[in-house]
């Protein structure tokens, strides 16, 4: 059985600007299972960032339910949400949100503060993560001394800091050239395959979306349609007992019932 890690039910979000109401999401139902790699696509203004913010408990819906690991988070107090976000979710924001007065390494260290890690461990992990996204040698650079693509990679390293079970990424490859884009998509795909990290990414790029498992298309705040991506093929495994196809993450073969 697939386990829902995030579930939205009849979810709507309307912003209020003075006397005007701006509907951003209308009656969205979406389930993302543990270990899924999902892309959200749609035209500018279709509600992608709003959807990601609601999924990541950064913003509350106007109506509807958000279940995170089966727990309704809509009515949870902010201090409890903060702890959940810090321990379970890594964010990559569309506008990076790096702190300008901290250097790259200190920005990556930030989510690890107030966790059970020493200063030395935090520093070491931050440097490793920066190396992983191809930024060795840039540790001491403050954001204004990094290119947009480099800032984006610092934001990705920061999202990985606490080894989150869920990564929510808003246009994580938007400012990258073809080579860096490929590397970041491969990095995310490998995290998903090897560590079973649930990943939801927003992208305008059809090539990036194709490398995910499921593509959700938004239009005017509604889910228009869904299609399968190429990543699902990588997850098809074979049962060692009977040779039947099994899904990545299954605990038991559905044909021969052997434990996997
Ligand atoms: N804080 C806000 N206050 C009022 N309206 C908002 C706010 N944030 C977003 N909106 C509106 O909600 C709608 C959805 O915005 P959202 O940022 O989710 O779109 P998006 O799909 O992420 O667009 P893009 O591809 O340009 O990033 C838009 O019409 C936008 O103008
Ligand atoms: Mg957006």
Image (spheres, rainbow, N blue to C red):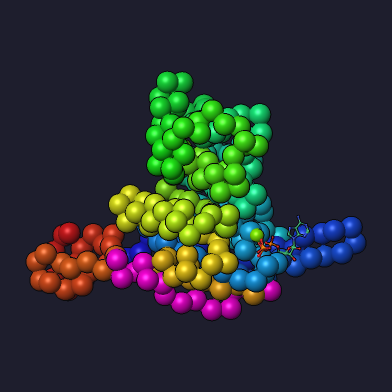
Whole-percent x and y of residue 219? 64, 75
* Front in this rendered view, residue 253 or 247: 247
x 43%, y 31%: residue: 127
Based on the picture, tell me whether residue 225 belongs to the magenta stretch: yes
Q: Residue furthest left?
A: 241
Location of the N terminus by quadrant is: bottom left
Which quarter of the figure has residue 43? bottom right
Location of the C terminus by quadrant is: bottom left
x 66%, y 65%: residue: 47
**Is residue 49 found left or right of 90 in the rendered image?**
right
Q: Give the vertical position of 109 relative to 219 (above or below).
A: above
Whole-percent x and y of residue 11? 63, 65
Whole-percent x and y of residue 141? 57, 31
Q: Is residue 141 visible?
A: yes
How many discs mark residues in the rendered view? 0
Q: Give the vertical position of 144 relative to 227 (above or below).
A: above
Tell me which image quadrant ligand 1 sits in.
bottom right
* Front in this rendered view, residue 4 or 196: 196
Q: Give the vertical position of 2 relative to 90 (above or below).
A: below
Based on the picture, tell me whether residue 168 belongs to the magenta stretch: no
Looking at the rendering, the stretch of residues picked out in magenta corresponds to: 220-234
**Is residue 194 found left or right of 126 in the rendered image?**
left
x 85%, y 58%: residue: 17
**Is residue 244 found left or right of 42 in the rendered image?**
left
Which quarter of the figure has residue 162? top left
x 70%, y 67%: residue: 45
Whole-percent x and y of residue 152? 56, 47
């Amino acid at each position: 059985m697939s386990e829902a890690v995030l579930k939205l039910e009849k979810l709507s979000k309307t912003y209020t600007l003075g006397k005007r109401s701006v509907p951003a999401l209308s009656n969205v139902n979406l389930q993302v299972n543990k270990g899924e790699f999902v892309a959200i696509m749609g035209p500018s203004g279709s509600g992608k960032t709003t959807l990601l913010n609601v999924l990541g408990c950064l913003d509350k819906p106007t109506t509807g339910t958000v279940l995170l690991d089966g727990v309704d988070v809509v009515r949870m107090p902010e201090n409890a949400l903060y702890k959940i976000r810090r321990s379970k979710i890594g964010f990559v924001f569309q506008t990076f949100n790096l702190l300008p007065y901290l250097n790259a390494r200190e920005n990556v260290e930030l989510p690890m503060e107030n966790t059970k890690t020493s200063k030395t461990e935090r520093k070491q992990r931050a440097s490793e993560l920066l190396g992983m996204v191809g930024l060795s040698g840039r540790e001491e650079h403050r954001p204004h001394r990094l290119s947009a693509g480099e800032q984006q990679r610092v934001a990705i390293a920061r999202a990985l800091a606490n080894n989150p079970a869920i990564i929510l990424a808003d246009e994580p490859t938007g400012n990258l050239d073809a080579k860096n884009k490929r590397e970041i998509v491969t990095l995310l795909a490998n995290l998903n395959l090897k560590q079973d990290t649930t990943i939801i990414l927003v992208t305008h790029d059809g090539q990036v979306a194709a490398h995910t498992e499921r593509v959700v298309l938004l239009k005017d705040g509604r889910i228009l349609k869904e299609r399968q991506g190429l990543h699902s093929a990588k997850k098809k495994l074979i049962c060692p007992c009977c040779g039947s196809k099994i899904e990545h993450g299954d605990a038991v073969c559905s044909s021969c019932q052997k434990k996997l």
